[in-house]
Amino acid sequence: MSDPIYPFDDTRDLEDAARGHLASLEPPQVRNDAGEVVWDAASYDFLDGDAPDTVNPSLWRQSRLVARQGLFEVVDGIYQVRGLDLSNVTFVEGDTGVIVIDPLISTETAAAALELYRSVRGDRPVTGLIYTHSHVDHFGGAKGVTTQEDVDTGRVPVLAPDGFLEHAIAENVYAGTAMARRAGYMYGAALPRNARGGVGAGLGQTTSTGTVTLIPPTDLIRETGEERTIDGVRIVFQMAPGTEAPAEMHFLFPDRRALCMAENATHTLHNLLTLRGALVRDPHVWAEYLSEAIERFADDADVVFASHHWPTWGRDRIVEFLGLQRDLYAYLHDQTLRLLNQGYTGIEIAELIELPPALERAWHTHGYYGSVSHNVKAIYQRYMGWYDGNPARLWKLPPADAATRYVEFMGGADAVVEKARASFEAGELRWAAEVLDHVVFAEPQHEGAKHLLADVLEQLGFGSENGTWRSAYLSAAMELRSGNFGTPTQTSSHDLLAELPPKLFLDAVAVQVNGPKAWDLDLAIAWEFPDHGERYRSTLRNGVFSAVRDGRGETTLSVTVPRAALGALAAGDVAASEAAGLALDGDEALLPQLLGVLDPGDPGFAIITP
């Protein structure tokens, strides 16, 4: 691969990121009700001047742009608050109030953003709420800008793409514990904010740590071309499922000539498979939806904005920006397929592939959040799976077992560490990391290996253009030196659990069953969900929990679960669920037996050590 091109002569982003600034949050901290800081914009004040040796100059530039916080005018009547969370919140003024788009992660940061907007534009009531897609940084702060009561009475409609609620909840149920733990590495949540630590994740600086909430949508957009008018504001929608999120949409404000691209066109190469884990995204349809957006909306827009970063103004620049973003995802998709059909594996393709000069010359195609390397591997995984076709790699030993044998073959741990030290001093960082990883997994208490691996990973982090790679390397180095920091930011919340559809609740039970512990159990339970109008019959046999809607057959316990009790039951709190109306009829011992074989995820599982 060639060295990246850094177009430092292109300063348009510097002007665009500052354009329309109206006010900043002062003081620049957001606190919860207990007085704890959940967001500190001032912690990035060190991002000043030229890049130090410990930060890639391209990432330093991106972080300086992303860290700018405050209220900005996009066009007359549309405003954004940026730099108060991982994402942006947008305010669109209507006839009587303001429509809120994507209310950040936390109620505290969302409320602070709304207060900042009102301090400049007046105390306008919230008259609508729009979620662009199903990731938590675009809905978690909902109750910081409106109330469930205002939504229930119809004063505030809540719009979202079809499938939003299922995907928003499912991501935090099926693999939520593992994703959250890995996200701690990805976003550098435990890193100190300085030139040797966290400088930003490329897409945004990091995640806030406040209260996550959810208000379910009241109106779903299902088809491209649908229109809505909220508080006198006309909106035209384009569906874009299976792109950056399973449920996502773009939309045009035709009377303001402003186009919102959700998270499908930002000032970075995005993830096709995020480092925290997710379903592999489809770059082919991603590119197609960007082409469709250009065709449908470009002639009617003077500005394009997104739920991260800063807007781009002018019809020609909009077409250039969206076109290059489209070409970026299409090129990675098509070239990966070309090379895999020539027999190359994902790891090999990641080393071979080069972007065209036009893409390299654009700042917004650089890999600050996603990367060419891990996106190419994701495309390979999407089409070919984990197996690369070589039978020698079909049944590999687990990492710790393989490591023990590798280290023995290489002459023992001390000998490997000394050889790795020579590689480190020669600048062979990737190789040093690979061999030291074997030592740490073979002998986790070998302090020399752990400290040298930390030094190696630190240097890899310092050189990374990608913000999430930097955070992952430095977070691993921190844990090797200081111990496991767990999961600093957990997005699962009472609001999310309370909105579980019955089928998803039962699926969540199934994936927690400790199979061997449940081998000898034979349970049949009827589940009634009166507020949902659904009934299920579940069995637990052979360590498998299976639930069938309206299933027939005998049961020895009936469990009635009103909506108010669902969140507590999903959290395993039977007493609280009974206080909220849970009712048992039959052999009441069965429910504790079922709950007793559930094995919740471990938010502190080891990553850099076995």
Image (cartoon, helix red, strand yellow):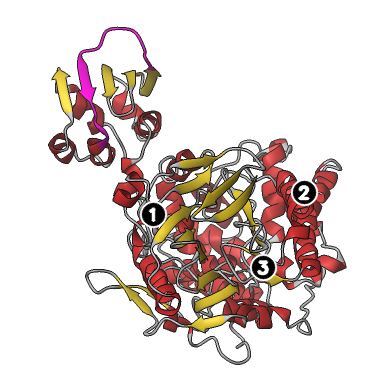
Position in image of residue 244 (x %, y %): 61, 51
The stretch drawn in magenta includes residue 466: no
Quadrant of the frame with the N terminus: bottom right
3D distance between C-alphas at marks 3 and 1: 25 Å
Say what secondary structure mark 3 lies in.
Answer: loop
The residue under label 2 is 333
Say what secondary structure mark 2 lies in.
Answer: helix
First in residue order: circle 3 vs circle 1: 3
Say what secondary structure mark 1 lies in.
Answer: loop
Say which amino acid is labelled 1: Thr
Which label sits on residue 491? 1
Asked whether 482 or 524 is in front, the reply is 524
Which residue is painted at 81% across and 44% down in the image?
A: 337
Position in image of residue 371 (x %, y %): 67, 61
User: Could you tell me if residue 402 is visible in this image?
Assistant: yes
Say which amino acid is labelled 3: His
**Image: magenta residue range:** 549-563
User: Could you tell me if residue 415 is visible in this image?
Assistant: no
Mark closer to the observer (3, 1) = 3
Q: How crowded is mark 1: few (under 14 residues within 10 Å), some or many (20 or more)?
A: many
Position in image of residue 417 (x %, y %): 55, 69
| Position above or below: 597 against 89 | above
The residue under label 3 is 267
Q: Are marks 2 and 1 in contact (CB under 8 Å)?
A: no
